Image (tube, rainbow, N blue to C red):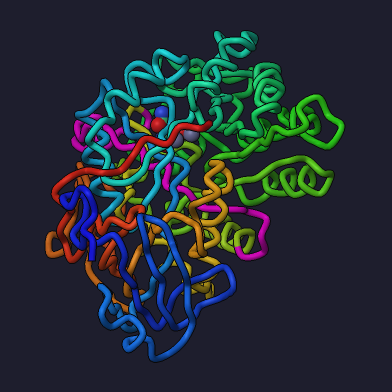
């Protein structure tokens, strides 16, 4: 059999091979059978219990009872390069992704320096990613007041390959990424309509009555999580979504932005905000929404004062709200899950002071999202098929990646092989590739679901605790 041209890209470097398993997650259900990989794509999927004899003579990997699922597609990762590699980077972030069973990441336009808001800055991203990617990485561009009314600037960003745009409706915490209002967002949607690409929105709106100085003034118990939670109430999410209503309506058939799609990132409020989203969806708006593993795993009662690992925006809310998020996900009102992996240099988490008001807001989770979603989801009876829709099929669709996100003939051979029943302590005894493990809220938890192997376009990029020698992921640019 032919070897692949660059054998260093894969720990199993064959042009053609079979993957066998008793649990292969396909769009038509979980089957026992085999997937044939050829030239990095899925050449065939066959069902049957005894396929060893059919693949004999060829190269094959028999994973037995371990689950073979489409690789996870994370539409919300902050990789922070160029400019902030002390926070994260293409190499470290994608190594953690590969170890966690994620095969595609879509990078957010902020936290790197500069932010990705123009053709030039997108080129800097792509340049900086060269030879560092262990998985495939696409890029969202930023919608900011400076480019929102400049259709030709947005056109060139789209033509240069940005998969869509991302906007903030509240201060982003990053100086060169100012916030947008609903008028900017409407303009952005109109510009995106002809490309059929989405606009992602961080939906929190600070009421006029709260200037940022007022907000943090006079707060004495800065170590208290309850205090932080009160400073970013659910009404901020609700106000933002309400403010987006007319923009959403423009995405309907016949609207000014027909063809564009609005996606609300990291929903935390599963009450009034969720109701507004349901209404907009049923009125025909082209709208979707994600939540994140940290909102599904934790509730405010779990967070100890001073433990700023849990600081994020919008904040993690009460236990009832967490249960509502699960219900909304199971009922299909929440479409998908993303990491919002947003690490920083550890010192910015201010562990010494435990100051929730001043610490960096962002959860560090990339390598752990699969076992976390699965472990907490088990209590809600989730299935492998649902998990795969939330983490692969729907995110791939949002990012316009029609060859990813499902195990079917013709798609990229992007897989995670994992053992859902295997439990482990997330501590030093586990292989951790996370850049800064000490800032991750998940360290110290017990999880179920161990990743064995990860394949990206047929390359076995991670197996049994080891990465392939060469980083052969590619930058994904929209055409
Ligand atoms: N800038 C940035 O990454 N912000 C993210 N962090 C967080 O907790 N929520 C966000 O939007
Ligand atoms: Zn955000
Ligand atoms: Zn984010």
- Residue appearing at x 55%, y 67% in the figure: 386
Q: Would you say 10 lies left or right of 413 here?
A: left
Q: Residue furthest front?
A: 1
In this orientation, does residue 134 appear?
yes
Front residue of this view, candidates 42 and 261: 42
Residue at the extreme right of the image, as rendered: 254
Q: Picture quarter containing residue 81? A: top left
- The correct choice, above or below, for 48 with respect to 326 in the image is below
Point 71% across, 30% down: residue: 244
Give 109 or 48, whichever is nearer the viewer.
48
Magenta portion: prevailing SS class: loop
When the figure is inspected, residue 307 is found, relative to residue 251, above or below; the finding is: below
Residue 140 pos. (x, y %): 48, 30
Tell me: residue 375, above or below residue 104.
below
- Asked if residue 342 is among those painted magenta in the image, a careful observer would answer yes
Which residue is drawn at the image coordinates 42% and 67% (left, top)? Answer: 69
Extreme bottom residue here?
50
């Amino acid at each position: 059999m032919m070897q692949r041209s660059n054998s260093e890209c894969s720990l199993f470097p064959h042009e053609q091979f079979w993957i066998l398993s008793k649990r292969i997650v396909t769009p038509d259900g979980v089957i026992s059978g085999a997937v044939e990989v050829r030239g990095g794509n899925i050449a065939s999927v066959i069902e049957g219990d005894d396929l060893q004899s059919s693949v004999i003579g060829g190269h094959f990997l028999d994973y037995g009872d371990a689950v073979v699922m489409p690789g996870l597609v994370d539409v919300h990762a902050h990789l922070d390069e160029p400019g902030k590699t002390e926070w994260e980077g293409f190499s470290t972030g994608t190594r953690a992704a590969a170890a966690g069973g994620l095969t595609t990441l879509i990078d957010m336009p902020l936290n790197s320096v500069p932010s990705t808001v123009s053709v030039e800055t997108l080129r800097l991203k792509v340049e900086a990613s060269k030879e560092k990617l262990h998985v495939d990485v696409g890029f969202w561009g930023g919608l900011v007041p400076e480019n929102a009314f400049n259709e030709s600037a947005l056109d060139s960003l789209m033509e240069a390959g940005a998969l869509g745009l991302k906007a903030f409706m509240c201060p982003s915490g990053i100086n060169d990424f100012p916030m947008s209002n609903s008028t900017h967002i409407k303009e952005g949607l109109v510009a995106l309509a002809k490309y059929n690409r989405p606009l992602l929105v961080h939906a929190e709106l600070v009421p006029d009555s709260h200037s940022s100085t007022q907000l943090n003034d006079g707060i004495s118990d800065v170590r208290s999580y309850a205090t932080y939670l009160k400073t970013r109430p659910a009404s901020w999410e609700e106000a933002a979504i309400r403010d987006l209503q007319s923009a959403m309506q423009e995405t309907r058939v016949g609207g000014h932005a027909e063809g564009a799609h609005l996606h609300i990132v990291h929903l935390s409020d599963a009450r009034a905000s969720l109701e507004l989203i349901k209404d907009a969806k049923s009125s025909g708006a082209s709208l979707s929404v994600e939540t994140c593993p940290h909102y599904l795993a934790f509730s405010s009662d779990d967070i100890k004062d001073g433990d700023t690992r849990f600081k994020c925006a919008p904040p993690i809310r009460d236990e009832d709200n967490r249960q509502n998020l699960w219900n909304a996900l199971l009922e299909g009102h929440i479409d998908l899950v993303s990491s919002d992996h947003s690490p920083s240099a550890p010192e910015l988490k201010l562990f010494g002071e435990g100051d929730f008001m001043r610490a960096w807001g962002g959860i560090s989770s990339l390598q752990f999202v699969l076992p976390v979603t699965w472990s907490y989801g088990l209590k809600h009876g989730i299935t492998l098929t649902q998990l795969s829709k939330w983490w692969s099929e729907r995110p791939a669709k949002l990012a316009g990646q029609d060859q990813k996100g499902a195990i079917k003939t013709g798609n990229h051979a992007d897989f995670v092989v994992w053992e859902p029943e295997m439990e482990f302590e997330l501590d030093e005894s586990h292989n951790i590739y996370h850049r800064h493990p000490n800032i991750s809220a998940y360290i110290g938890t017990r999880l179920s679901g161990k990743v064995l192997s990860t394949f990206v376009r047929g390359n076995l990029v991670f197996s049994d605790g080891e990465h392939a020698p060469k980083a052969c992921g590619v930058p994904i640019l929209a055409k």
